[in-house]
Image (cartoon, rainbow, N blue to C red):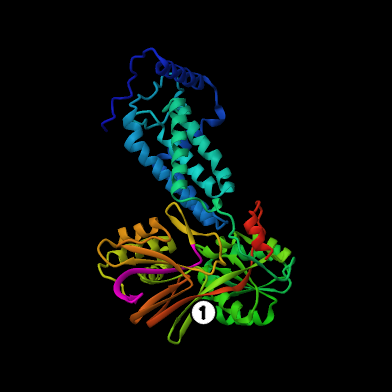
Protein backbone atom coordinates (compact mmCIF):
# COMPACT_ATOMS: atom_id res chain seq x y z
CA UNK A 1 0.00 0.00 0.00
CA UNK A 2 1.35 3.45 -0.92
CA UNK A 3 0.63 6.98 0.17
CA UNK A 4 -1.71 7.32 -2.80
CA UNK A 5 -3.95 4.49 -1.66
CA UNK A 6 -7.48 5.59 -0.94
CA UNK A 7 -7.34 8.32 -3.58
CA UNK A 8 -9.38 6.23 -6.00
CA UNK A 9 -12.67 7.25 -4.40
CA UNK A 10 -14.54 9.88 -6.47
CA UNK A 11 -14.58 13.44 -5.20
CA UNK A 12 -17.48 15.89 -5.25
CA UNK A 13 -17.87 17.93 -8.43
CA UNK A 14 -18.04 21.68 -8.78
CA UNK A 15 -18.53 24.41 -11.30
CA UNK A 16 -16.21 26.37 -13.51
CA UNK A 17 -14.06 25.52 -16.56
CA UNK A 18 -12.08 22.80 -14.80
CA UNK A 19 -15.21 21.09 -13.46
CA UNK A 20 -16.79 21.20 -16.92
CA UNK A 21 -13.70 19.64 -18.49
CA UNK A 22 -13.64 16.90 -15.88
CA UNK A 23 -17.33 16.21 -16.41
CA UNK A 24 -16.82 15.98 -20.17
CA UNK A 25 -13.87 13.66 -19.60
CA UNK A 26 -16.03 11.36 -17.47
CA UNK A 27 -18.73 11.32 -20.15
CA UNK A 28 -16.14 10.32 -22.77
CA UNK A 29 -14.99 7.54 -20.46
CA UNK A 30 -18.55 6.28 -20.03
CA UNK A 31 -19.07 6.37 -23.80
CA UNK A 32 -15.91 4.36 -24.39
CA UNK A 33 -16.93 1.85 -21.71
CA UNK A 34 -20.28 1.34 -23.42
CA UNK A 35 -18.73 0.50 -26.78
CA UNK A 36 -18.52 -3.17 -27.76
CA UNK A 37 -14.94 -4.06 -28.79
CA UNK A 38 -14.83 -7.88 -29.05
CA UNK A 39 -11.62 -7.92 -31.12
CA UNK A 40 -9.73 -6.06 -28.38
CA UNK A 41 -10.80 -8.13 -25.37
CA UNK A 42 -7.79 -10.46 -25.49
CA UNK A 43 -5.24 -8.03 -26.90
CA UNK A 44 -5.48 -4.70 -25.08
CA UNK A 45 -5.50 -5.93 -21.45
CA UNK A 46 -2.45 -8.10 -22.14
CA UNK A 47 -0.71 -5.25 -23.93
CA UNK A 48 -1.45 -2.94 -21.01
CA UNK A 49 0.06 -5.42 -18.54
CA UNK A 50 3.10 -5.94 -20.80
CA UNK A 51 3.85 -2.21 -20.57
CA UNK A 52 4.04 -2.30 -16.76
CA UNK A 53 7.37 -0.92 -15.51
CA UNK A 54 8.46 -0.32 -19.13
CA UNK A 55 9.04 -4.04 -19.79
CA UNK A 56 7.42 -3.85 -23.24
CA UNK A 57 9.61 -0.92 -24.28
CA UNK A 58 12.85 -2.42 -23.01
CA UNK A 59 12.09 -5.58 -25.00
CA UNK A 60 11.21 -3.51 -28.07
CA UNK A 61 14.43 -1.52 -27.75
CA UNK A 62 16.43 -4.76 -27.56
CA UNK A 63 14.71 -6.06 -30.70
CA UNK A 64 15.37 -2.81 -32.58
CA UNK A 65 19.04 -2.76 -31.56
CA UNK A 66 19.49 -6.41 -32.54
CA UNK A 67 18.11 -5.80 -36.03
CA UNK A 68 21.37 -4.21 -37.16
CA UNK A 69 19.58 -1.79 -39.50
CA UNK A 70 20.85 1.78 -39.97
CA UNK A 71 20.29 3.94 -36.89
CA UNK A 72 18.73 1.01 -35.03
CA UNK A 73 20.93 1.25 -31.92
CA UNK A 74 20.81 5.06 -31.67
CA UNK A 75 17.02 4.89 -32.11
CA UNK A 76 16.65 2.31 -29.34
CA UNK A 77 18.93 4.30 -27.03
CA UNK A 78 17.06 7.56 -27.69
CA UNK A 79 13.71 5.86 -27.09
CA UNK A 80 14.84 4.53 -23.70
CA UNK A 81 16.38 7.87 -22.73
CA UNK A 82 13.10 9.64 -23.54
CA UNK A 83 11.13 7.02 -21.61
CA UNK A 84 13.40 7.51 -18.58
CA UNK A 85 12.89 11.28 -18.59
CA UNK A 86 9.11 10.87 -18.92
CA UNK A 87 8.93 8.31 -16.10
CA UNK A 88 10.99 10.47 -13.75
CA UNK A 89 8.79 13.48 -14.49
CA UNK A 90 5.59 11.51 -13.93
CA UNK A 91 6.74 9.97 -10.66
CA UNK A 92 8.30 13.10 -9.15
CA UNK A 93 5.93 15.82 -10.35
CA UNK A 94 2.92 14.59 -12.32
CA UNK A 95 1.28 12.14 -9.94
CA UNK A 96 1.84 14.34 -6.90
CA UNK A 97 0.70 17.62 -8.44
CA UNK A 98 -2.79 16.61 -9.63
CA UNK A 99 -4.22 14.02 -7.25
CA UNK A 100 -7.11 12.81 -9.38
CA UNK A 101 -8.92 9.59 -8.39
CA UNK A 102 -9.17 6.62 -10.74
CA UNK A 103 -12.40 6.02 -12.70
CA UNK A 104 -15.17 3.93 -11.14
CA UNK A 105 -15.31 0.46 -12.68
CA UNK A 106 -19.05 -0.18 -12.50
CA UNK A 107 -19.48 0.79 -16.19
CA UNK A 108 -16.51 -1.26 -17.45
CA UNK A 109 -17.22 -4.88 -18.46
CA UNK A 110 -15.48 -7.37 -16.19
CA UNK A 111 -13.69 -9.06 -19.11
CA UNK A 112 -11.77 -5.84 -19.77
CA UNK A 113 -10.66 -5.07 -16.24
CA UNK A 114 -7.09 -5.68 -15.09
CA UNK A 115 -6.60 -8.27 -12.37
CA UNK A 116 -4.40 -5.89 -10.39
CA UNK A 117 -5.86 -2.39 -10.38
CA UNK A 118 -3.35 0.47 -9.91
CA UNK A 119 -3.62 2.31 -6.59
CA UNK A 120 -1.75 5.50 -7.55
CA UNK A 121 -3.52 8.66 -8.68
CA UNK A 122 -4.96 8.80 -12.16
CA UNK A 123 -3.55 11.98 -13.71
CA UNK A 124 -1.52 11.82 -15.89
CA UNK A 125 -1.23 8.34 -17.37
CA UNK A 126 2.29 7.02 -16.82
CA UNK A 127 1.83 4.20 -19.34
CA UNK A 128 0.77 6.69 -22.01
CA UNK A 129 3.67 8.98 -21.21
CA UNK A 130 6.17 6.12 -21.50
CA UNK A 131 4.61 4.90 -24.74
CA UNK A 132 4.62 8.34 -26.35
CA UNK A 133 8.12 9.13 -25.11
CA UNK A 134 9.58 5.90 -26.44
CA UNK A 135 7.82 6.14 -29.81
CA UNK A 136 8.71 9.82 -30.29
CA UNK A 137 12.32 9.25 -29.26
CA UNK A 138 12.70 6.39 -31.71
CA UNK A 139 11.06 8.40 -34.49
CA UNK A 140 13.37 11.39 -33.98
CA UNK A 141 16.37 9.15 -34.65
CA UNK A 142 14.78 6.82 -37.24
CA UNK A 143 11.41 7.71 -38.83
CA UNK A 144 11.06 4.17 -40.18
CA UNK A 145 11.40 2.54 -36.79
CA UNK A 146 9.19 5.26 -35.34
CA UNK A 147 6.44 4.35 -37.79
CA UNK A 148 6.75 0.70 -36.74
CA UNK A 149 6.56 1.49 -33.02
CA UNK A 150 3.80 4.13 -33.19
CA UNK A 151 0.82 1.70 -33.57
CA UNK A 152 2.00 -0.24 -30.50
CA UNK A 153 2.38 2.95 -28.48
CA UNK A 154 -1.08 4.12 -29.53
CA UNK A 155 -2.57 0.75 -28.55
CA UNK A 156 -0.96 0.92 -25.11
CA UNK A 157 -2.40 4.38 -24.55
CA UNK A 158 -5.83 3.20 -25.75
CA UNK A 159 -5.66 0.17 -23.47
CA UNK A 160 -5.56 2.40 -20.39
CA UNK A 161 -9.03 3.74 -21.15
CA UNK A 162 -10.27 0.36 -22.42
CA UNK A 163 -9.34 -1.41 -19.16
CA UNK A 164 -10.89 1.36 -17.07
CA UNK A 165 -7.78 2.56 -15.23
CA UNK A 166 -7.61 6.05 -16.79
CA UNK A 167 -9.86 8.77 -18.13
CA UNK A 168 -9.22 9.91 -21.74
CA UNK A 169 -7.85 13.21 -20.40
CA UNK A 170 -5.28 11.33 -18.33
CA UNK A 171 -4.09 9.50 -21.43
CA UNK A 172 -3.93 12.66 -23.54
CA UNK A 173 -1.95 14.51 -20.86
CA UNK A 174 0.44 11.59 -20.49
CA UNK A 175 1.01 11.41 -24.25
CA UNK A 176 1.75 15.15 -24.41
CA UNK A 177 4.18 14.85 -21.50
CA UNK A 178 5.89 11.84 -23.12
CA UNK A 179 6.33 13.65 -26.42
CA UNK A 180 7.71 16.63 -24.50
CA UNK A 181 10.24 14.37 -22.80
CA UNK A 182 11.45 13.12 -26.19
CA UNK A 183 11.82 16.71 -27.42
CA UNK A 184 13.73 17.61 -24.25
CA UNK A 185 16.20 14.78 -24.89
CA UNK A 186 16.45 15.96 -28.49
CA UNK A 187 17.32 19.47 -27.31
CA UNK A 188 20.14 18.17 -25.10
CA UNK A 189 21.48 15.53 -27.52
CA UNK A 190 20.17 16.22 -31.04
CA UNK A 191 19.48 13.21 -33.23
CA UNK A 192 21.96 12.31 -35.90
CA UNK A 193 19.21 12.80 -38.50
CA UNK A 194 19.18 16.53 -37.67
CA UNK A 195 22.62 17.01 -39.24
CA UNK A 196 23.35 16.80 -42.94
CA UNK A 197 26.48 15.33 -44.50
CA UNK A 198 29.52 17.54 -44.02
CA UNK A 199 30.61 19.92 -46.76
CA UNK A 200 33.97 19.28 -48.43
CA UNK A 201 35.76 19.55 -51.77
CA UNK A 202 34.69 17.46 -54.76
CA UNK A 203 37.18 14.96 -56.15
CA UNK A 204 37.54 12.91 -59.31
CA UNK A 205 36.65 9.25 -58.80
CA UNK A 206 35.47 6.45 -61.11
CA UNK A 207 31.74 5.74 -61.38
CA UNK A 208 31.04 2.07 -60.62
CA UNK A 209 27.27 1.53 -61.06
CA UNK A 210 27.47 -2.26 -60.71
CA UNK A 211 30.58 -2.34 -58.50
CA UNK A 212 33.03 -3.65 -61.13
CA UNK A 213 36.54 -2.66 -60.02
CA UNK A 214 35.57 -2.37 -56.35
CA UNK A 215 37.18 -4.73 -53.84
CA UNK A 216 35.63 -4.56 -50.36
CA UNK A 217 37.41 -5.98 -47.33
CA UNK A 218 34.92 -6.79 -44.55
CA UNK A 219 36.00 -7.34 -40.96
CA UNK A 220 34.15 -10.43 -39.70
CA UNK A 221 34.56 -9.26 -36.09
CA UNK A 222 32.18 -6.36 -36.80
CA UNK A 223 29.29 -8.82 -36.90
CA UNK A 224 27.34 -7.09 -39.68
CA UNK A 225 26.82 -9.92 -42.17
CA UNK A 226 23.58 -8.27 -43.34
CA UNK A 227 25.59 -5.25 -44.54
CA UNK A 228 27.75 -7.47 -46.73
CA UNK A 229 24.71 -9.29 -48.17
CA UNK A 230 23.06 -5.98 -48.96
CA UNK A 231 26.26 -4.76 -50.61
CA UNK A 232 26.38 -7.82 -52.88
CA UNK A 233 22.75 -7.24 -53.87
CA UNK A 234 23.28 -3.57 -54.77
CA UNK A 235 26.76 -3.98 -56.32
CA UNK A 236 26.80 -7.51 -57.80
CA UNK A 237 30.13 -7.08 -59.64
CA UNK A 238 32.04 -5.98 -56.53
CA UNK A 239 34.46 -8.44 -54.97
CA UNK A 240 33.92 -8.95 -51.24
CA UNK A 241 36.70 -10.37 -49.05
CA UNK A 242 35.77 -11.56 -45.56
CA UNK A 243 38.67 -11.67 -43.13
CA UNK A 244 39.50 -12.01 -39.46
CA UNK A 245 41.01 -8.97 -37.68
CA UNK A 246 44.45 -10.58 -37.64
CA UNK A 247 44.45 -10.72 -41.46
CA UNK A 248 42.95 -7.27 -42.02
CA UNK A 249 46.02 -5.29 -43.09
CA UNK A 250 47.34 -8.07 -45.33
CA UNK A 251 43.98 -8.39 -47.09
CA UNK A 252 43.71 -4.62 -47.49
CA UNK A 253 47.13 -4.54 -49.18
CA UNK A 254 46.15 -7.41 -51.47
CA UNK A 255 42.84 -5.76 -52.34
CA UNK A 256 44.52 -2.43 -53.06
CA UNK A 257 46.84 -4.12 -55.59
CA UNK A 258 43.82 -5.41 -57.56
CA UNK A 259 41.21 -2.68 -57.18
CA UNK A 260 40.32 0.56 -58.93
CA UNK A 261 38.50 1.49 -55.72
CA UNK A 262 39.29 0.10 -52.28
CA UNK A 263 36.24 -0.65 -50.14
CA UNK A 264 35.93 -1.43 -46.46
CA UNK A 265 33.14 -2.65 -44.20
CA UNK A 266 33.66 -2.38 -40.46
CA UNK A 267 33.93 0.02 -37.56
CA UNK A 268 36.12 3.08 -37.19
CA UNK A 269 39.26 1.06 -36.44
CA UNK A 270 38.80 -1.02 -39.59
CA UNK A 271 38.14 2.10 -41.66
CA UNK A 272 41.30 3.65 -40.21
CA UNK A 273 43.39 0.71 -41.45
CA UNK A 274 41.80 0.95 -44.90
CA UNK A 275 42.41 4.71 -45.05
CA UNK A 276 46.12 4.19 -44.34
CA UNK A 277 46.36 1.79 -47.30
CA UNK A 278 44.27 4.05 -49.56
CA UNK A 279 46.44 7.09 -48.81
CA UNK A 280 49.65 5.14 -49.37
CA UNK A 281 48.38 3.65 -52.64
CA UNK A 282 46.62 6.78 -53.89
CA UNK A 283 43.26 4.98 -54.22
CA UNK A 284 39.76 6.33 -53.57
CA UNK A 285 38.05 4.73 -50.56
CA UNK A 286 34.46 3.46 -50.32
CA UNK A 287 33.24 3.12 -46.71
CA UNK A 288 30.33 0.92 -45.63
CA UNK A 289 29.54 1.26 -41.89
CA UNK A 290 29.68 -2.10 -40.15
CA UNK A 291 30.77 -1.41 -36.58
CA UNK A 292 29.16 -0.07 -33.42
CA UNK A 293 29.67 3.70 -33.74
CA UNK A 294 30.77 4.41 -37.35
CA UNK A 295 31.59 8.05 -36.66
CA UNK A 296 33.49 8.69 -39.88
CA UNK A 297 30.88 7.10 -42.16
CA UNK A 298 28.06 9.03 -40.52
CA UNK A 299 29.86 12.36 -40.67
CA UNK A 300 30.44 11.51 -44.32
CA UNK A 301 26.70 10.97 -44.81
CA UNK A 302 26.88 7.21 -45.48
CA UNK A 303 24.25 5.46 -43.37
CA UNK A 304 23.86 2.21 -45.33
CA UNK A 305 24.64 0.43 -48.58
CA UNK A 306 22.06 2.45 -50.50
CA UNK A 307 23.93 5.66 -49.74
CA UNK A 308 27.22 4.09 -50.79
CA UNK A 309 25.64 2.63 -53.93
CA UNK A 310 24.36 6.05 -55.02
CA UNK A 311 27.78 7.60 -54.51
CA UNK A 312 29.56 4.85 -56.47
CA UNK A 313 27.00 4.90 -59.30
CA UNK A 314 27.55 8.64 -59.84
CA UNK A 315 31.26 8.73 -59.05
CA UNK A 316 30.49 11.27 -56.35
CA UNK A 317 33.56 11.63 -54.13
CA UNK A 318 35.21 14.26 -51.94
CA UNK A 319 38.65 15.00 -50.52
CA UNK A 320 39.01 14.91 -46.74
CA UNK A 321 41.79 15.71 -44.31
CA UNK A 322 43.68 13.00 -42.47
CA UNK A 323 45.35 13.39 -39.07
CA UNK A 324 48.78 11.89 -38.41
CA UNK A 325 50.63 11.15 -35.17
CA UNK A 326 54.39 10.51 -34.93
CA UNK A 327 56.38 9.30 -31.92
CA UNK A 328 59.92 8.13 -32.62
CA UNK A 329 59.57 5.25 -35.04
CA UNK A 330 55.83 4.91 -34.44
CA UNK A 331 53.49 6.59 -36.87
CA UNK A 332 49.80 6.32 -37.66
CA UNK A 333 46.76 8.09 -39.10
CA UNK A 334 43.43 9.08 -37.62
CA UNK A 335 40.20 10.02 -39.37
CA UNK A 336 38.16 10.90 -36.27
CA UNK A 337 40.38 11.68 -33.30
CA UNK A 338 43.54 10.92 -31.41
CA UNK A 339 43.90 11.11 -27.62
CA UNK A 340 46.20 10.62 -24.66
CA UNK A 341 45.24 10.10 -21.03
CA UNK A 342 42.01 8.70 -19.69
CA UNK A 343 40.42 7.70 -22.99
CA UNK A 344 43.12 5.21 -24.08
CA UNK A 345 42.88 3.69 -20.60
CA UNK A 346 39.12 3.41 -21.06
CA UNK A 347 39.48 1.79 -24.50
CA UNK A 348 41.93 -0.78 -23.17
CA UNK A 349 39.66 -1.62 -20.25
CA UNK A 350 36.61 -1.78 -22.52
CA UNK A 351 38.33 -4.24 -24.84
CA UNK A 352 38.97 -6.56 -21.90
CA UNK A 353 35.23 -6.95 -21.31
CA UNK A 354 33.51 -6.30 -24.64
CA UNK A 355 33.76 -9.90 -25.90
CA UNK A 356 32.08 -11.11 -22.69
CA UNK A 357 29.29 -8.61 -22.04
CA UNK A 358 29.03 -6.55 -25.24
CA UNK A 359 30.39 -3.19 -26.33
CA UNK A 360 28.02 -0.76 -24.60
CA UNK A 361 28.01 -2.45 -21.15
CA UNK A 362 31.78 -2.85 -21.38
CA UNK A 363 32.16 0.86 -22.12
CA UNK A 364 30.13 1.82 -19.06
CA UNK A 365 32.07 -0.59 -16.85
CA UNK A 366 35.39 0.71 -18.22
CA UNK A 367 34.41 4.34 -17.58
CA UNK A 368 33.49 3.58 -13.98
CA UNK A 369 36.74 1.70 -13.44
CA UNK A 370 38.97 4.38 -14.96
CA UNK A 371 37.29 7.35 -13.29
CA UNK A 372 37.48 5.66 -9.87
CA UNK A 373 41.17 4.89 -10.24
CA UNK A 374 42.08 8.05 -8.26
CA UNK A 375 45.25 8.87 -10.18
CA UNK A 376 46.40 11.11 -13.02
CA UNK A 377 46.87 8.81 -16.00
CA UNK A 378 49.26 11.20 -17.76
CA UNK A 379 51.91 13.82 -16.98
CA UNK A 380 53.26 15.67 -20.00
CA UNK A 381 54.79 18.93 -21.21
CA UNK A 382 52.49 21.01 -23.36
CA UNK A 383 53.27 24.56 -24.54
CA UNK A 384 56.30 24.67 -22.23
CA UNK A 385 54.40 23.67 -19.08
CA UNK A 386 54.58 20.30 -17.33
CA UNK A 387 51.27 19.33 -15.77
CA UNK A 388 49.07 16.34 -14.97
CA UNK A 389 46.33 15.78 -17.54
CA UNK A 390 43.18 13.70 -17.49
CA UNK A 391 42.75 13.96 -21.23
CA UNK A 392 44.40 15.41 -24.31
CA UNK A 393 42.12 15.06 -27.32
CA UNK A 394 42.72 16.10 -30.95
CA UNK A 395 39.87 15.84 -33.42
CA UNK A 396 40.43 15.62 -37.17
CA UNK A 397 38.38 18.73 -37.97
CA UNK A 398 36.36 20.99 -35.70
CA UNK A 399 33.60 19.19 -33.81
CA UNK A 400 30.43 21.23 -33.42
CA UNK A 401 28.64 20.87 -30.10
CA UNK A 402 24.98 19.88 -30.36
CA UNK A 403 23.64 19.99 -26.82
CA UNK A 404 25.94 17.69 -24.85
CA UNK A 405 26.98 15.79 -27.98
CA UNK A 406 30.26 17.13 -29.46
CA UNK A 407 30.30 14.53 -32.23
CA UNK A 408 29.31 16.38 -35.42
CA UNK A 409 31.72 17.91 -37.94
CA UNK A 410 30.49 20.41 -40.51
CA UNK A 411 33.62 20.04 -42.61
CA UNK A 412 36.21 17.27 -42.90
CA UNK A 413 38.60 19.40 -44.98
CA UNK A 414 39.04 22.45 -42.73
CA UNK A 415 42.78 21.99 -42.13
CA UNK A 416 42.43 22.20 -38.34
CA UNK A 417 42.88 19.99 -35.30
CA UNK A 418 40.23 20.41 -32.59
CA UNK A 419 42.47 20.20 -29.50
CA UNK A 420 40.89 19.86 -26.04
CA UNK A 421 42.72 19.38 -22.75
CA UNK A 422 41.25 18.42 -19.36
CA UNK A 423 43.75 19.33 -16.63
CA UNK A 424 44.48 17.02 -13.74
CA UNK A 425 42.85 17.54 -10.37
CA UNK A 426 39.99 16.32 -8.20
CA UNK A 427 36.63 15.11 -9.53
CA UNK A 428 37.71 13.90 -12.99
CA UNK A 429 34.16 13.04 -14.08
CA UNK A 430 32.98 16.61 -13.42
CA UNK A 431 36.01 18.03 -15.24
CA UNK A 432 35.38 15.85 -18.28
CA UNK A 433 31.68 16.77 -18.31
CA UNK A 434 32.48 20.49 -18.01
CA UNK A 435 34.87 20.24 -20.96
CA UNK A 436 32.21 18.47 -23.05
CA UNK A 437 29.59 21.11 -22.25
CA UNK A 438 31.96 24.04 -22.86
CA UNK A 439 32.82 22.90 -26.38
CA UNK A 440 35.51 24.34 -28.66
CA UNK A 441 37.49 27.53 -28.02
CA UNK A 442 36.99 27.36 -24.24
CA UNK A 443 39.55 28.00 -21.49
CA UNK A 444 39.33 27.62 -17.72
CA UNK A 445 41.26 26.24 -14.74
CA UNK A 446 39.96 22.74 -15.47
CA UNK A 447 39.97 22.56 -19.27
CA UNK A 448 41.03 24.34 -22.43
CA UNK A 449 40.25 24.06 -26.15
CA UNK A 450 42.12 25.50 -29.13
CA UNK A 451 42.32 24.97 -32.88
CA UNK A 452 45.68 24.21 -34.53
CA UNK A 453 47.16 22.48 -37.54
CA UNK A 454 50.03 20.96 -35.53
CA UNK A 455 50.67 20.05 -31.88
CA UNK A 456 53.71 18.63 -30.06
CA UNK A 457 53.54 16.92 -26.66
CA UNK A 458 56.80 16.04 -24.88
CA UNK A 459 57.91 14.35 -21.67
CA UNK A 460 55.73 11.26 -22.10
CA UNK A 461 56.94 8.29 -20.03
CA UNK A 462 57.53 4.88 -21.65
CA UNK A 463 54.37 2.84 -22.01
CA UNK A 464 52.06 5.85 -22.45
CA UNK A 465 48.93 4.81 -24.31
CA UNK A 466 47.62 6.68 -27.35
CA UNK A 467 44.19 5.99 -28.85
CA UNK A 468 43.43 6.72 -32.48
CA UNK A 469 40.01 5.91 -33.95
CA UNK A 470 39.35 3.40 -31.17
CA UNK A 471 42.68 1.59 -31.54
CA UNK A 472 45.39 1.79 -28.85
CA UNK A 473 49.16 1.90 -29.30
CA UNK A 474 52.14 2.65 -27.04
CA UNK A 475 54.23 5.84 -27.35
CA UNK A 476 56.89 7.63 -25.30
CA UNK A 477 59.01 10.77 -25.32
CA UNK A 478 57.55 13.15 -27.90
CA UNK A 479 54.31 12.88 -29.88
CA UNK A 480 53.60 15.17 -32.82
CA UNK A 481 50.06 15.55 -34.15
CA UNK A 482 49.52 17.18 -37.54
CA UNK A 483 47.07 17.48 -40.41
CA UNK A 484 47.49 16.08 -43.93
CA UNK A 485 45.14 18.41 -45.86
CA UNK A 486 42.76 16.68 -48.31
CA UNK A 487 44.99 13.58 -48.35
CA UNK A 488 42.18 11.03 -48.86
CA UNK A 489 39.54 10.70 -51.56
CA UNK A 490 36.38 9.04 -50.29
CA UNK A 491 32.93 8.41 -51.79
CA UNK A 492 29.96 10.20 -50.28
CA UNK A 493 26.32 10.34 -51.43
CA UNK A 494 25.15 13.57 -53.09
CA UNK A 495 23.20 15.84 -50.79
CA UNK A 496 19.49 15.19 -50.97
CA UNK A 497 18.67 18.55 -49.42
CA UNK A 498 19.26 22.01 -50.79
CA UNK A 499 22.79 23.27 -50.18
CA UNK A 500 23.99 26.73 -49.35
CA UNK A 501 25.97 28.87 -51.81
CA UNK A 502 29.08 28.33 -49.69
CA UNK A 503 28.82 24.55 -50.03
CA UNK A 504 28.12 24.83 -53.76
CA UNK A 505 31.26 26.87 -54.25
CA UNK A 506 33.27 24.26 -52.33
CA UNK A 507 31.82 21.40 -54.37
CA UNK A 508 32.77 23.06 -57.65
CA UNK A 509 36.19 24.30 -56.56
Q: Residue 393: x and y, percent?
A: 41, 68
Tell me if residue 121 comes above or below residue 281 in the rendering: above
- Residue at (57, 82) in percent of width and height: 250
Q: Quadrant of residue 287?
A: bottom right
Determine the main secondary structure of the stretch shown in magenta.
strand
- Residue at (39, 58) in percent of width and height: 436
Tell me if residue 460 comes above or below residue 397 in the rendering: below
In front of the other: 103 or 39: 103
Callout count = 1
In front of the other: 244 or 293: 293
Residue 122 among magenta residues: no
From this viewpoint, which residue is outermost toward the top? Answer: 15
Q: Which stretch did the figure color magenta? A: 380-398
- Residue at (44, 63) in percent of width and height: 359
Residue 391 among magenta residues: yes
Q: Is residue 402 visible?
A: yes
Q: Which residue is mark 1?
A: 246
Viewport quadrant of the C terminus:
bottom right
Viewport quadrant of the N terminus:
top left
Q: Residue 376: x and y, percent?
A: 28, 71
Q: Residue 19: x and y, percent?
A: 40, 16
Q: Residue 18: x and y, percent?
A: 40, 18
Tell me if residue 347 comes above or below residue 31 in the rendering: below
Q: Quadrant of residue 282?
A: bottom right
Q: Is residue 308 visible?
A: no
Amino acid sequence: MTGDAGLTAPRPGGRGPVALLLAQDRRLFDTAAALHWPAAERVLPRLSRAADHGVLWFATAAAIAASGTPRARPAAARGLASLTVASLTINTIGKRSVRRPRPALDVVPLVRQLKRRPITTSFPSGHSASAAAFAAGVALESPRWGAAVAPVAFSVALSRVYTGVHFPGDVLAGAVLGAGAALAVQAVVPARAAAGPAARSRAEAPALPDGAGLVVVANTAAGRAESVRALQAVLPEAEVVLCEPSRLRAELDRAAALARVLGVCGGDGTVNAAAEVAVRRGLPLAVLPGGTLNHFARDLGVEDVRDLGRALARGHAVRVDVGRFTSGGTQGLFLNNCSLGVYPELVRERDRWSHRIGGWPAGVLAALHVLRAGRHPLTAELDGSVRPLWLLYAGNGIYRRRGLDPGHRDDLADGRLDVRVVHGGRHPALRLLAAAVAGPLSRSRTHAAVQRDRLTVTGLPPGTLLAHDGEVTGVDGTVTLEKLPEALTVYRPPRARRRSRVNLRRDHA
